[in-house]
């Protein structure tokens, strides 16, 4: 049996922004079943379709080019998968592309390099470029994180690969994954900006599929 691995590139927006990670996985699984795709199943007492989201998207974020990795039991032309899934996904999820990748080897999630974000502020901040430059000028940026009730300290500076203002009302962040990562909310906290009314879009994920 010749298995096939595909990357489904999709947009998550509108009301779909408020689907949790597990709800999104369930929604996409249901769409795959409705599309009658010959997906491969996991082993064990409760077999599930072999599919995974490359990087969970936090609740409330828009995702422009999210990646779902799926494994099929038999080859199906990517353009056929595209047509079938476009007909079955709910409103708020848009299938952009379906790309065939090598069936063997590590999963896409294990090869993440970076993620790009656009953060739009609720109100303009004239000194935004200067504040971002001040963050980039720092050698270390230590933050506190709560992990399962335990507080840990971590330097997030190595994970900030790029940080640029887009006028006075938005900024773009490229966050690395090689040495931990950094969340847009952490940058907002460093800037002293409230999270209320903020719009965050993940525009791209790199390292797993260059699209």
Image (tube, rainbow, N blue to C red):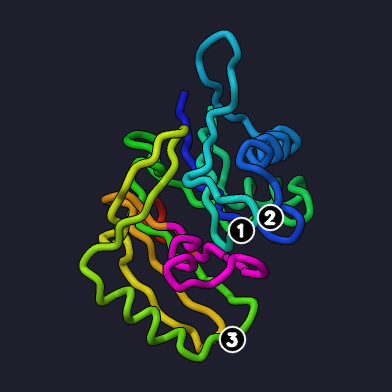
Q: Using the image as rendered, state which of residue 153 and residue 39 is in the foreground.
A: 153
Residue 87's disc is none
> Nearer the N terminus, badge 3 or badge 2?
2
Is residue 177 in the magenta section? no
Answer left or right for 22 relative to 138: right
Q: State the residue at coordinates (71%, 39%).
A: 27
Residue 17's disc is 2
Label 2: state its secondary structure. helix
> Nearer the N terminus, badge 1 or badge 3?
1
The extreme top residue here reads: 45
Residue 61's disc is 1
**Quadrant of the image occupied by residue 161:** bottom left
Answer left or right for 153 relative to 184: left
Q: Which residue is mark 3?
A: 124
Q: State the residue at coordinates (58%, 75%).
A: 120
Answer left or right for 182 relative to 40: left
Q: State the residue at coordinates (76%, 45%).
A: 88
Label 1: state its secondary structure. loop
**Quadrant of the image occupied by residue 163:** bottom left
Image location (x, y in percent) of residue 2: 45, 28
Tags 1 and 2 touching, CB below 8 Å: yes
Range shown magenta:
183-203
Q: State the residue at coordinates (58%, 69%).
A: 194
Instruction: Report, in whole angstroms, how far the alpha carbon at label 3 lies from the one at label 2.
Output: 24 Å
Label 3: state its secondary structure. loop
Is residue 200 in the magenta section? yes
């Amino acid at each position: 049996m010749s298995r096939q691995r595909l990357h489904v590139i999709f947009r998550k927006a509108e009301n779909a922004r408020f689907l949790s990670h597990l709800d999104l996985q369930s929604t996409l699984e249901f769409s795959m079943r409705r599309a009658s795709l010959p997906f491969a199943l996991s082993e064990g007492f409760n077999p599930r379709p072999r599919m995974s989201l490359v990087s969970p998207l936090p609740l409330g974020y828009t995702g422009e080019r999210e990646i779902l990795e799926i494994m099929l039991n038999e080859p199906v032309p990517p353009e056929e998968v595209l047509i079938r899934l476009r007909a079955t996904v709910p409103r708020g999820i848009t299938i952009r592309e379906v790309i065939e990748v090598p069936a063997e080897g590590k999963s896409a999630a294990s090869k993440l390099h970076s993620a790009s974000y656009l953060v739009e502020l609720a109100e303009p901040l004239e000194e935004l470029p200067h504040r971002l430059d001040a963050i980039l000028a720092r050698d270390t940026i230590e933050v506190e994180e709560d992990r399962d009730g335990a507080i840990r300290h971590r330097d997030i500076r190595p994970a900030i690969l790029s940080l640029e203002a887009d006028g006075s009302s938005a900024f773009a962040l490229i966050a690395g994954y090689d040495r931990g990562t950094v969340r847009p909310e952490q940058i907002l906290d460093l800037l002293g900006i409230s999270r209320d009314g903020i719009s965050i879009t993940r525009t791209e994920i790199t390292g797993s599929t260059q699209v």
